[in-house]
Image: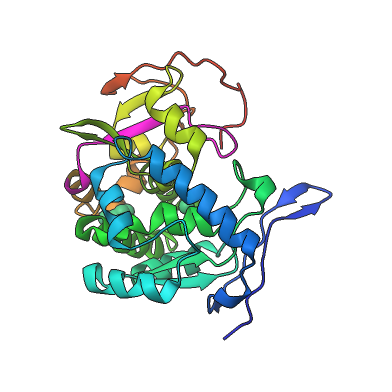
Amino acid sequence: MTEARRVEHQMTDKGYVPVYTTAVVDQPWDSYTATDHAVWGQLFRRQSELLPGRACNEFVDALRALEMSDREIPKFDDINRHLMKATGWKLIGVQGLLPELTFFEHLAAREFPVTWWIRRPDQIDYIAEPDLFHDLFGHVPLLMNPVFANYMQAYGEGGVRASTFGPESLANLTRLYWYTVEFGLIDTPQGMRIYGAGIVSSKGESLHCLDSAAPNRIGFDLRRVMRTRYRIDTFQKSYFVIDGFEQLFKATVDPDFGPIYDEIKGAETVPAGDLREGDRVFQSGSGEGWLLDGDV
Ligand code: PHE
Ligand code: CO
């Protein structure tokens, strides 16, 4: 087993560049400092107070079932006992970002890569890359849900397959991940709720995505999502809303993406903030505060 290192982006003459590693590491739990545990505790308290009534019940209930608390950084082995029993998923420790194909292969094997290290106190509100809080608090609770757990595995298999089709297909699939797993909203009988990991791990975006007049909220449509660019450095301009995890599963796992990639190949991409004919619009965003460039 490789010794755990903290791998972050690097500053070069081209600006910040992400650094990728493939190693799987044991969580060096004894090496967390009092500050690391305190950062976890502060973020955990803040989000677990904010999220009831904002995040979907599946997320909020799973936090409790996983026995995470603000006392200390959870041990991956303890989380894994719960996960294994519920859905057969397992966390593996990683040092930072993984190359795309490696990431897909882990998901296909029902292994979720979690960055072992946590952000510093000066990064409480924003960090450019995924850390332990984002990965563990944001992503892992929904892996307790059988339908979502199957979606994530199927996504990994779909990624391995898309890797053989080329960069455009991969970009289509990455947008699907972004607008579901990271920034998805779900329409429930109790109202609009959050399920995306990038939202639940961020105080600012947990408020913004539901309360602000600025962003669009649009009903989920596979081809539309696959063509829509996104923001990595600011709140999203558009969120896509599913009716439930079953709907998401049916819309993505059942169809063969091969012909769909071909069909949308060469079609123009949609800017992150645009509304299009045929959109099921829950909210037409005011666009307040939007930067004009920077969609990726
Ligand atoms: N159905 C997709 C394919 O044929 C795989 C997939 C499943 C992709 C779930 C994303 C999410 O490639
Ligand atoms: Co993430």
In reply to whether residue 239 is colored magenta, the answer given is yes
The picture quadrant where one finds residue 183 is top left
Question: In front: 75, or 152?
Answer: 75
Q: Residue at x 38, y 45 (%)?
A: 176
Question: Residue 190, image x and y in percent?
Answer: 19, 31
Q: Is the N terminus in the top left, top right, bottom left or bottom right quadrant?
A: bottom right
Q: Which residues are magenta?
A: 231-246
In the picture, residue 56 is in which quadrant? top left
Is residue 119 inside the magenta stretch? no
Along the line of sight, the residue nearer the viewer: 115 or 51 = 51
Front one among 266 and 215: 215
**As drawn, is 190 to the left or to the right of 73?**
left
* Ligand 1 rendered quadrant: bottom left
- Is residue 230 shown to the viewer in this render? no
At 73% from the left and 49% from the top, the residue drawn is 16
Q: How far across and down, in percent of the image, does residue 210 sit?
A: 37, 27
For this orientation, the residue located farthest to the right is 13
Identify the residue at horizontal 61%, vertical 69% (top origin).
Answer: 32
Q: Which residue is at 57% across, 73% downward?
A: 22
